Amino acid sequence: MSDTNNSWLESADAGRLRDFPYLWITWIAKYLAGTNDCKLSIWFRATHQDYEKIPMVGNLKAWEVNHRNLRDEMIADLTIKNPTAKITIEKQNSLQVTGRSTIISGKPDIMVRYKDENRIDIYDAKTGADKPADRFQMLLYRWLYRYIDKTLQIGLFLNYRGMERE
């Protein structure tokens, strides 16, 4: 690459280098599913922070409202079905595993922890179409939680607008 081709990496829009490579579970899931095969995109996000992001296409506010409503409906249903379980949402479920060369992070929508059992169920609310990356996302959550506790039993559930799938 010539200097003119990679000069964008040195611009203010490119942010700054991370101290340690960082990957978000959904980035990995899309790559594994083949819906984002751009290695440069993954490398850039893994190695840079505070960069200028391209505005999202579509109505993000409408998606946020739809997602929150579906998530809240799921929580209400889970609370009725599992009155003694501890149910946590999004930020409470933040997960970060630091390996020798990379940090991997994720944030499941809903987690149900069962009292006196070494078991959790992970739920993800999906307001769009069923995508292969969704399954990879859930499998990556399981992999990271098993990395932390190999004895933990983990159920995975995707909910597409009320149609639950294991």
Image (cartoon, rainbow, N blue to C red):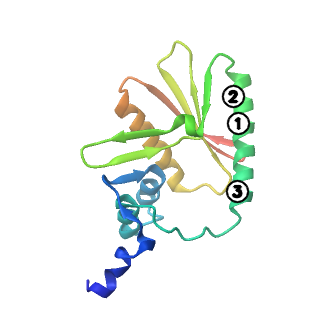
Location of residue 123 in the rendering, given as x and y in whole percent from the top left corner:
59, 37
Mark 1 or mark 3: which is in front? 3
Mark 2 to mark 3 CA distance (whole Å): 22 Å
Q: What kind of residue is marked 2?
A: Leu
User: Going 47% across and 19% down the picture, which residue do you hit?
Assistant: 118
Q: Are marks 2 and 1 in contact (CB under 8 Å)?
A: yes
Residue 70 shows in this picture:
yes
Location of residue 76 in the rendering, given as x and y in whole percent from the top left corner:
74, 31
Residue 162 shows in this picture:
no
Location of residue 10 in the rendering, given as x and y in whole percent from the top left corner:
35, 75
When asked about the image quadrant of residue 150, the answer is: top left
User: Going 75% across and 44% down the picture, which residue do you hit?
Assistant: 69
The mark found on residue 115 in the picture is none
User: Mark 3 Cα within 10 Å, few/some/many (few <14, many 20+)?
Assistant: some
Quarter of the rendering occupied by the N terminus: bottom left
Q: On screen, 81 above or below 136? A: above
Mark 2 or mark 3: which is in front? 3
Q: On screen, 124 above or below 27? A: above
The mark found on residue 63 in the picture is 3
Front-most of 61 and 115?
61
The mark found on residue 78 in the picture is 2
Mark 1, secondary structure of its residue: helix
Mark 1 to mark 3 CA distance (whole Å): 16 Å
User: Going 73% across and 38% down the picture, which residue do you hit?
Assistant: 72
Mark 2 to mark 1 CA distance (whole Å): 6 Å
Q: What kind of residue is marked 1?
A: Met
The mark found on residue 74 in the picture is 1
